[in-house]
Image (cartoon, rainbow, N blue to C red):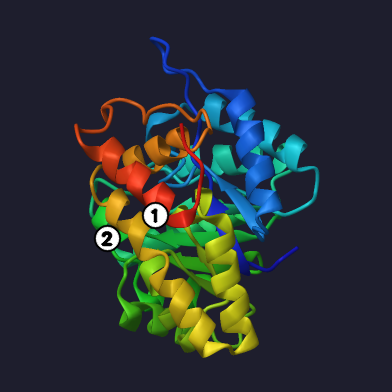
Amino acid sequence: MSKFQGIIVPMVTPFNRDDAQTINYEAGEKLVEKLIAGGASGIFTFGSNGEFHVCTPDEKIEFSKFVIEKVAGRVPVYVGTGACSTREACEMSKRAEAIGADALSVINPYFLGISDVQVATYFRMVAESVKIPVMLYNIPKATGKNISPEVVAEVAQIDNVKGVKDSSGNMDNLKAYIEAAAGKDVDVLVGSDGKISEAHALGASGAVAGTANLITEVVVNLWKALEAGDGEEAARLQAEIEPIRDVLHLGSTPQTLKRSLELAGYEVGPARFPVTEVAEGVDEKAVAMLDHYGISHR
């Protein structure tokens, strides 16, 4: 398995409403089954929607191991292992490989603005610490740094670097990645759910779509329509992602997504502190959105 294609779901990490906001494994299993039944091409643990930044290394490995066991080879499981520290990212990557991850998603170091040379060295060291495929994860609004197309071109030469996910929302950046990866057996995926059709037209091989936690079939069918060349159906389904995106913009990631899933009967709990419960009035908007999609709610 060396390809990153189709709709990969960055699954939310379910938490209990206890003092420690512990991980709710039972809800995790239920969500895994929903995503697979909805036709997801892959499941990705501990991305931004999975709240990697507020979970401990042990929590990430233990819950990812559980997800890998429950998925049981039906779709690839990707694990987020990036960190500010290269040493931690390498350790996490080795641990994820050991529990059976099919591939890794590696965010670039955040907080400190490091140079392109340092970013490339980080990705090289992480990729070389494992044998499984690695996908670079670009989300400049969260990391403070855009992974440059030059870094992508350089790092794409490493044998097991097989993908790059761009959540910049900038289609020129995505296009530059596709050009940088050309001829190198590296897939480029889009991480902006509102731009899946645009990305497909440029040559993206898939999307890592947070909205697919809830509206799995809509996003999966959008990709199928794009692949089949059905422009009219693709345009309809791309527009059909907007109602949930409008609700997601009412809070911090993944606060309103988790609340919407909860209202739809998936006990994924709240986002972890410092993110708090959703603001007043959000529930009504979330319920109206669920009604729009014909999703039953409590």
Q: What residue type is labelled 2?
A: Lys
Residue at image location 50% in from the left, 47% down from the top: 295
Where does the image place residue 116, in percent across and percent down from the top left? 33, 66
**Direction top: furthest residue:** 19
Quadrant position of the N terminus in the picture: bottom right
Residue at image location 55% in from the left, 23% down from the top: 24
Per the rendering, the mark at residue 79 is none
Query: Sequence-wise, which precedes: disc 2 or disc 1?
Result: 1
Secondary-structure class at tag 2 = loop
Can you identify the residue that label 1 sits on? 108
Q: In this view, does 33 lie to the left or right of 258?
A: right
Residue at image location 53% in from the left, 81% down from the top: 233
Residue 240, compared with residue 94, is above or below; it is: below
Q: What residue type is labelled 1?
A: Asn
Question: CB under 8 Å between callouts 2 and 1?
Answer: yes
- Let me know if residue 152 appears in the view: no
Residue at image location 48% in from the left, 87% down from the top: 201
Where does the image place residue 93, in percent across and percent down from the top left? 59, 44
Can you identify the residue that label 2 sits on? 145
Where does the image place residue 62, in percent across and percent down from the top left? 63, 27
- Let me know if residue 49 appears in the view: yes
- Say which of 286 and 228 sits in front: 286
- Say which of 102 and 97 sits in front: 102
Where does the image place residue 26, in percent across and percent down from the top left? 63, 24
Residue 258, compared with residue 165, is above or below; it is: above
Residue 288, compared with residue 243, is above or below; it is: above
Label 2 and label 1: CA atoms lie apart by 8 Å
Give the quadrant of residue 223: bottom right
Secondary-structure class at tag 1 = loop
